[in-house]
Image: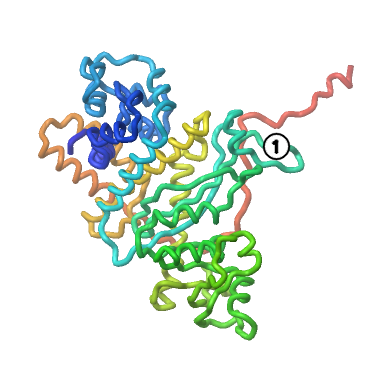
Amino acid sequence: MESTDAILDLFMKSAPTDWCERLRRDLGFTNVCGGLFSCSLTCWLMLRQRLEGCGVESAWLTVSPDLAQLLSPKSKRAASGNLSAFAGGYGHARQSVPFALVAALTDRVNQHVIDSCPEPEYRACVLDGSSFSPDGSAELRKAYPPCENQHGQSHFPTIRFAVAHDLWTGVALRPEWGPMYGPEAVSEQALALKLVERMPAGAVVVADRNFGVFSVTHKILDSARACVFRLTDQRAAKILGKGVPLNADGCYPVLWKPSKDDRKTNPDLAEDACIEGRVVIRHVMKQGSAKPFRLCLFVSGTDMPDDELVKLYAKRWLIETDLRTLKHTLDMARMSARTPDTLAKEILLGVTAYNLVRALGAESAKLLNVPARSISYTRIAACAKAYAPRLAAEPDPLKRDQLGKEMLLRAGARQLATRNRPSQPRKVWARRSKFPARQASTQGEKN
């Protein structure tokens, strides 16, 4: 390992400092990110904030003179070892680093991570969407209006985003996001259309019924990718036409034509636009339920057997745990940025931090010859953090490599279990409070 931190080592291999410097000059940013707070150092500290769940000051206090010189080799300040004890410079660098520079760096790191993972039998992506509410500021609330109801407006801005993850490794592509409410609100389907070109060529795209609409399906197939989308019962019945029952298993070749509403919301569709595919209907048993569950899938662009398609769609649930990791383990649901520009950079680097940990998980899975998804994200992140001091204290490069291999083996020693528990009905858990509920005082009435 080149550094004493496995995740930092992978970050530097993905985006070397000399490449970052050339990128900065090629993009024309000659007046920023050229001193101590280079693009490499600034982006790494923002990654570290997300991985450690710490603030600006805590992240800056972890920077040693050696680390500063490693990530900013041309800085005279880093070479002198005289670093400020205050985090004001880093806080300013977070805001001044250009978004285009961060976007290009994250794309390179994400692509390097994808290329370093073992090649699967076939490429498959899972598409999904969610929302999150960062800490509020006037500028963020203007860009991403809060939700409203009969009681008024919420305090926090609300952001809708769409993600696409590799089905086998969990590695994420660069996401898309936008306001969830307000006059410029965007839908998950509109965000998904922007993600299509980032998906691997020839990949099979798996998504739930929220994306099983004509516009998204047509875009994916038009880009030479296959789709396995779930349909609502109403849409499946309309595509199949009268006379085809939904209460029996079957596979039916169809020609899906856009409806009037599809053409109204997508005026760019050609007059003869249509999708050729098949509708697969299966009734499967849910765990803990005696009633079969109907599954209607629209399939196009792949000749996989029907039963294999049903098993493939069952893996769609993996992206739900990925979203939980992004929003809660990495705490992206409560980011501290105060401006839309800084928030955008935090989102990109948060996904990059997630991908770097996933890449270590893929390396661990390769050593143990197990699926990459069987390695716990939390486990590999904890191992990387625990082994960093030991790697730093070891001067011998060969022994440091052995420690790195030991870290990967220990990360995969306890793999995720296959859970076959019966499903339970969803319940609402009461929020705990440190203080008792406030009661109206009756002292004035007694007086």
Q: Nearer the viewer, residue 272 or 437?
A: 272
- The residue labelled by disc 1 is 153
At 48% from the left and 76% from the top, the residue drawn is: 277
Tag 1: amino acid: Gln
At 35% from the left and 14% from the top, the residue drawn is: 85
Q: Give the class, few, some or many, for how many residues have Cα within 10 Å of label 1's Cα (few <14, many ≥20).
A: few
Residue 379 seen in this snapshot: no
Say whether residue 401 is left or right of residue 183: left
Q: Nearer the viewer, residue 121 or 24?
A: 24
Q: Which quadrant is the N terminus positioned in?
A: top left
Q: Nearer the viewer, residue 352 or 421?
A: 352
**Relative vertical location of residue 262 with respect to residue 352 in this rendering, above or below:** below
Residue 352 position by quadrant: top left
Q: Position of residue 112 (x, y in %)?
A: 28, 48
Q: Which quadrant is the C terminus positioned in?
A: top right
At 41% from the left and 35% from the top, the residue drawn is: 50
